[in-house]
Amino acid sequence: MQRYLSWIRREVLPILAIVLFMTAGRSSLADHYHVPSGSMENTLFPGDRVIVDKTAYGLRIPYTKIDVVDRDMPAAGEIAVFDSPLDGELLIKRIVAVGGDQVTLHHGHLFINGEPLAVENEAAAEQFGQRVAELNLRDGGGPDIDGVTVPADMVLAMGDHRGNSLDGRYFGFVPVRELYGRAVAVYFRSGEGFVWRRL
């Protein structure tokens, strides 16, 4: 019996500790996401695998949504992972507006606080600070938005494939505390293999 307990301490407990550490790390530090649909084309494509920084908006107690260290607030243009307010499905969408922003969307084109985000001479691109979103408007722009203001501590998240995205136009605003993390880069793309494309 003593030999058996010694074997458990020596062999089993270290393995359990490693598994616990790895799952806690995925819960609170970093994870990957498999893109299931084309709602984020032409930025993300079905089958893409994406690295997600789960510390971007705060350091959380593992397996909870309790932040112990606050970090950056989400910014327009970032791509975030969160649960759908409709059915709890894990989604990846672009944050197009944050608390206080007034949003208008016509034919798939955004205006934030009255300013168009369209990139000059590029009908299907929008500029969010340093980030450029390459839109897919093949299926039109989806539902329009007329001068809606995003409440404090909330974000509006939309897909870049504006006519083929079940997003904030359908399920409303997402509380900042519900964001799991920020998508950092695509590390695998079907047909190309391993890549590194910053988002």
Image (tube, rainbow, N blue to C red):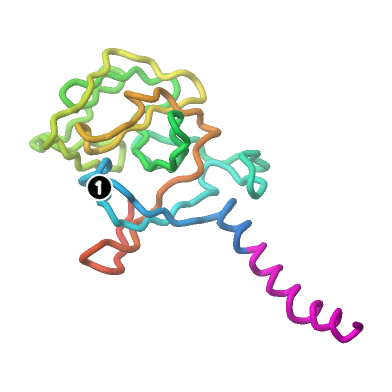
The picture places residue 162, in percent across and down from the top left corner, at 22, 33
| Residue occupying image coordinates x 45% and y 23% | 99
Residue 175 within the segment the image draws in magenta: no
- Mark 1 belongs to which amino acid? Thr
State left or right for residue 143 relative to residue 81.
left
Foreground: 166 or 195?
166
The extreme front residue here reads 1
Residue interval drawn in magenta: 1-21
Question: Mark 1 highlights which residue?
Answer: 43
Q: What is the quadrant of the N terminus in the image?
A: bottom right
The picture places residue 78, in percent across and down from the top left corner, at 37, 41
Foreground: 190 or 112?
190
The image shows residue 164, relative to residue 153, as above or below, that is: below
| Residue occupying image coordinates x 33% and y 51% | 35
State left or right for residue 64 relative to residue 132.
right
Foreground: 60 or 113?
60
The picture places residue 106, in percent across and down from the top left corner, at 18, 20
| Residue occupying image coordinates x 23% and y 26% | 110
The extreme right residue here reads 2
The image shows residue 166, relative to residue 104, as above or below, that is: below
